[in-house]
Each structure stands twice: as C-alpha cells, then as structure tokens.
C-alpha cells in the first residue's frame, strides 16, 4: 500500500510539474499577448531582429511551442515570410532553455511559499496587472512544487538503480533519440520533458552519472519540440505547412551538425560536464549549448531551407482569390487568440479584395454590355456569400472564447466590416442583373444619362477602393477622403435624379433605361454608405493602432 502511495505521489508530482509549467507559460503569454502580435509582425523585417525576437519572446513566455505556432500562423496568414518565420523559430529554441536553467537552481523547498505568494496576488487583488503577475508566480511555484514531490517520491521508492538501468537501456544513440523525440512529441513541450529528465536523474543521486549517456535523449527532445507546430499545421493552409516543415528541417539540421561536432570533437561533452557541476546543471547547459551552437550553424542555411521548401511545396493554384475555402484561417484549435485574430483579419482583407474586384467587374460588365462577364460576377457572388458565412462562423466561435478586452473590440469591428462588405457584394450582383436586363430587353439610356451614370459609377468605385485601403492601412487621411466622397455621391444622386425627371418630362429617355437609371442611382448611394461605414471603423479606436 505504501509503495502504491509513492507511485501516486510520483505521478501527482509529474502532473503538478506539467500543469505548473503550462500555467506559467500561459500566464506569461497572456501578460504579454496583447503586444506580442504587433511585435512579431512589425519587428521581424531584418533577419537579426527576427532571430533575436525568437530568443527574447520565448525566454519571456517560456514556450517555444507557443512561439512556433504563433509564427506558423503569421506565415500562413502571409504576415511574415517563411525565412523570417524560420529565423524566429530557431531563436525560440534558445529562448526555451531558460526553464532548464531555472530548474537547475535548488529552490524546490521554497515552492510552498512561492505558491502562497502567487495565490495571494492572483486571488485577492483586483488590479489586472497584479493578477497576471500573481498567475506567473503561482505557476512558477507549482512547477517547483511538482519537482519537490517527484524528488520525494523517487527517494522514498529508491528508484536510483531503476532510473540508471533505464538510461543504460538507451545506450543505442538512435533508440535514445527516438525515445526523447516520442516523449516530447506526446507532452508537446521540450521544457517539460527536459525538466522531468533533470528531476529524475538528480533524484537518483548517482555518483557515476555520465552526461554522455543522455545527450541523444536531449537531442531527441529538442526535435520533438516541433510537435505543436506540426499538429497545428495539419488544419492550416499550404503556407502554414511550409512553416511546420521548415521548423522540422531546422531542428534536424541543428541535430545533425551537433552530432557531427561530437564525432569530430569527442571531448565537447566532457567539457560541458566539467564546467557545469550538478547533474541538473549539466543537462541544462547541454540543452543550452546544443541550441546555441545548432542555431549559429543553421542560420546561414535559413534561406536555402526556405527556398528548397518553396520549390517542393509551391503555391497551390486552387488557393486563388476566389477559391471557395478559407486561405488564412485554420480549422484547428491549437492557435493562440492573437494568431487567430491576425488570421481572421487577413482573411477579411482577402474578402475585401474579392468584393472590390467583383464590384469593379460588375460596373465594367454593365458599360461594356458583357453578359458573360455579368454571369461571372454572379458566380463570384456565390463564392463571396460562402466565404462570408465561413468567416462569420469563425468570428462567432472566436467571440465565445476568453479574450483580452481590446480583442473583443477588434472582433466587433470585424463583424461590422464583414456585413458592409457583403452588402457591397450584393449590389455588385444587382449590377450584373441590370446588365443582363439591359442586353436582353434592349433597355437603353440617352447619351447624357449614360455619361451621368458613368460618373456616378466610378465615384463609387473610387470610394469602395479608398475605404478598403483606409481599413487595411489604418489610414485616417483616406478615411477623411471617403467621408468627403460619400457627401459628393449623396449630392450627385439628388442632382442626377432631378436631371432624370427633366428628361422624362421631355420624353428624352427610354422608360426601361430610365428605370435602370433610377435603380442604379439608389444602389450607388447605398454602396457609398457601406464604404463609409468600413472606413469609419477607424473611429472605433482610442488610438491609431492597426486593426
């Protein structure tokens, strides 16, 4: 019975450790998440910045998996190039080694006090920043409490000989690598897997511990760290899959080059062990040095890896502007909220381009009298309606999750923009119908009426284009131009209606053409109204930040 209790104690310690490391990582991410999206999007234009950001961001949030998934999402949404994304992911491998360095400090006995302090801050303070700090401290304390419980269970069960025998069974480098890879792939965190290895080996207190006996396990754990981005890519688009393949390729390049280094310089492992001291510090330092050397060796090959992947996995012709599927949004739930919002925004940008392109074609179809082009507009409108429903459903699901307050505001603006864009699409469909009616029923307009309706039409083409660009670029000057254009369209509609009435009195207008003229004026005015709504979403911001 006592042995069973110790087994449960060991399992509970492992569970508490895994929960603590995940809770700490999640809390750190939430504390920084509001800014991470903009940081990663805007500060990765230079290669060295991308690499250093990968190191820094992951050192802060302590999850290379979260960083890689976020970057993969940005690559999938075409907010970041593949080579820049790969640089960030290589940097993330170094940033995640901080956890192992922290675990190497013997502060587990202080874990109950750390948990207590974290709980006080998290539970009894209303200030949002204090609560977030408390959550980080609480996760940190739970992590070390798990370590403490694991160590106690291993000591009481006298597992030192068993652990040593287990490690000795992996004297074959390939088996050791595969074990480390599989273990990390399952728990999806190299920080956690390396941490568990540290605790297990430290608790055996084996005097004859040899770092060389576990190096291939640690290398396998580092390669297994790509599991979150691989799993995430399964539900993404081709660009997201490229990012996952690039992450795996980079890890393999790092592993092979370091293995070659160990063959050329066998004393490197003894050197690391000699400067490290304790078992946990030896593992932590090897974990760090492996990733630093691997990164430095891999950096010159980033462009080569990216280009090779692009050649082997080129753009899919089916992923065109009017393809009837979401191109930037994945179906899986692995992505962080920041990435999902960035992807939704990119999908709405694509949707806006679809609507704008189809609207322009509908105007061209009418003035060219091209029924085939009008039919194509109507076919594209069916795709627009489908994509609109898909994005709307995605946004609804996202809105039901726990998000930062400013992300809810962003989602609200997205819903509004989606509605206005869809309405502009409906009017394009109307103009396609007008084309078919004009051709099939020979509904003609006088030369003057045609010139007037042409002026009105291209005013709305301009306002639609400017409103979409204002939203995309967060351009307040363009928004102001749209506001002026909307007034011009309103005034022009009134003027042209008066002119039409005069022509009708003089019987200068064909009744069928006159009906089209009036209907089109009404449509044009509504298009301008929706365009104004899109541009004025910028006014929903307290400050000029990108939405």
Image (tube, rainbow, N blue to C red):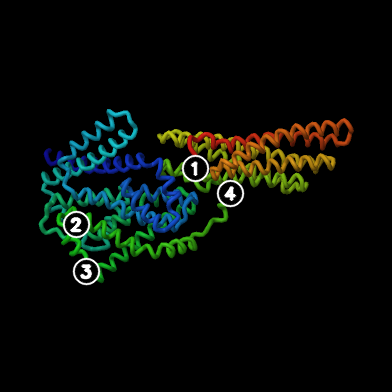
N-terminal-most mark, 1 or 3: 3
Ranked by sequence position, the earlier of labels 1 and 4 is: 4
Give the crowd class for mark 1: few <14, some 14-19, many >=20 residues within 10 Å: few
48 is higher (above) or lower (below) than 423:
below
Q: Distance between the residues labelled 1 and 3?
A: 52 Å
317 relative to 478, above or below: below
Q: Is mark 4 on a helix, strand or loop?
A: loop
Q: Which of marks 3 and 2 is nearer the N terminus?
A: 3
Q: How crowded is mark 2: few (under 14 residues within 10 Å), some or many (20 or more)?
A: many
393 to the left or right of 435: left
- Disc 3: which residue: 266
Q: Distance between the residues labelled 3 and 4?
A: 55 Å
Tell me which corner region of the image, top left, top right, bottom left or bottom right, holds residue 164: bottom left
Q: Is mark 2 on a helix, strand or loop?
A: helix
Inspect this view and state whether residue 223 appears: yes
When asked about the image quadrant of residue 135, the answer is: top left
Q: How far apart are marks 1 and 4 (CA)?
A: 27 Å
Q: Which of marks 1 and 2 is nearer the N terminus?
A: 2
The x, y position of residue 198, in whole percent, is 20, 51
Q: How far apart are marks 3 and 2 (CA)?
A: 16 Å
Mark in front: 1 vs 4: 1
In the picture of the structure, the residue carrying the numbered disc 1 is 546
Q: Of discs 1 and 2, which sits in the foreground? A: 1
**Secondary structure found at label 3:** loop
Q: Are marks 3 and 4 in contact (CB under 8 Å)?
A: no
């Amino acid at each position: 019975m006592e042995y069973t209790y110790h087994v449960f104690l060991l399992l509970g310690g492992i569970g508490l450790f895994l929960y603590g490391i995940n809770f700490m990582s999640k809390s750190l991410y939430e504390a920084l998440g509001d800014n991470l999206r903009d940081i990663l999007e805007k500060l990765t234009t230079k290669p060295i910045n991308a690499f250093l950001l990968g190191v820094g961001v992951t050192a802060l949030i302590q999850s290379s998996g979260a960083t890689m998934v976020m970057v993969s999402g940005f690559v999938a949404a075409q907010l970041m190039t593949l080579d820049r994304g790969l640089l960030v992911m290589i940097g993330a491998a170094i940033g995640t080694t901080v956890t192992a360095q922290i675990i190497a400090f013997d502060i587990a006995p202080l874990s109950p006090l750390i948990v207590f302090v974290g709980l006080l801050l998290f539970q009894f303070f209303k200030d949002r920043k204090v609560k977030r700090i408390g959550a980080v401290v609480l996760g940190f304390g739970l992590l070390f409490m798990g370590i403490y419980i694991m160590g106690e269970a291993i000591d009481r069960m006298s597992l030192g000989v068993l652990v040593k025998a287990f490690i000795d069974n992996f004297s074959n480098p390939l088996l050791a690598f595969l074990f480390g890879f599989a273990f990390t792939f399952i728990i999806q965190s190299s920080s956690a897997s390396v941490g568990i290895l540290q605790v297990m080996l430290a608790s055996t207190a084996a005097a004859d511990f040899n770092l060389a006996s576990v190096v291939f396990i640690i290398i396998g754990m580092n390669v297994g760290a790509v599991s979150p981005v691989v799993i995430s890519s399964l539900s993404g688009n081709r660009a997201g899959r490229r990012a996952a393949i690039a992450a795996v390729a980079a890890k393999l390049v790092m592993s092979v080059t370091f293995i070659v280094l160990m063959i050329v310089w066998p004393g490197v492992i003894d050197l690391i062990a000699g400067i490290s001291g304790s078992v946990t510090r030896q593992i932590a330092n090897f974990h760090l040095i492996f990733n630093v050397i691997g990164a430095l060796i891999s950096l010159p090959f980033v462009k080569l890896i990216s280009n090779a992947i692009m050649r082997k996995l080129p753009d899919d012709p089916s992923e065109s502007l009017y393809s009837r599927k979401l191109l930037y949004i994945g179906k899986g739930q692995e992505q962080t909220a920041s990435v999902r919002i960035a992807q939704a925004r990119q999908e709405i940008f694509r949707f806006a381009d679809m609507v704008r392109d189809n609207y322009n074609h509908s105007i061209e179809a009418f003035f060219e009298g091209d029924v085939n082009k009008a039919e194509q507009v109507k076919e594209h409108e069916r795709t627009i309606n489908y994509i609109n429903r898909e994005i709307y459903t995605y946004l609804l699901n996202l809105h039901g999750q726990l998000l930062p307050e400013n992300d809810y505001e962003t989602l609200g603006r997205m819903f509004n923009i989606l509605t206005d864009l869809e309405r502009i699409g409906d009017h394009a469909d109307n103009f396609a119908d007008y084309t078919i009616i004009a051709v099939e029923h020979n509904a003609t307009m006088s030369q003057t009426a045609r010139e007037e309706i042409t002026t009105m039409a291209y005013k709305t083409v301009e306002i639609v284009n400017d409103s979409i660009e204002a939203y995309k670029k967060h351009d307040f000057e363009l928004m102001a131009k749209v506001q002026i254009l909307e007034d011009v369209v309103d005034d022009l509609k009134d003027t042209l209606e008066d002119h039409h009435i005069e022509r009708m009195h003089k019987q200068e207008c064909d009744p069928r053409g006159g009906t089209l003229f009036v209907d089109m004026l009404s449509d044009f005015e509504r298009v301008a109204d929706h365009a104004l709504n899109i541009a004025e979403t910028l006014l929903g911001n307290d400050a000029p930040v990108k939405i």
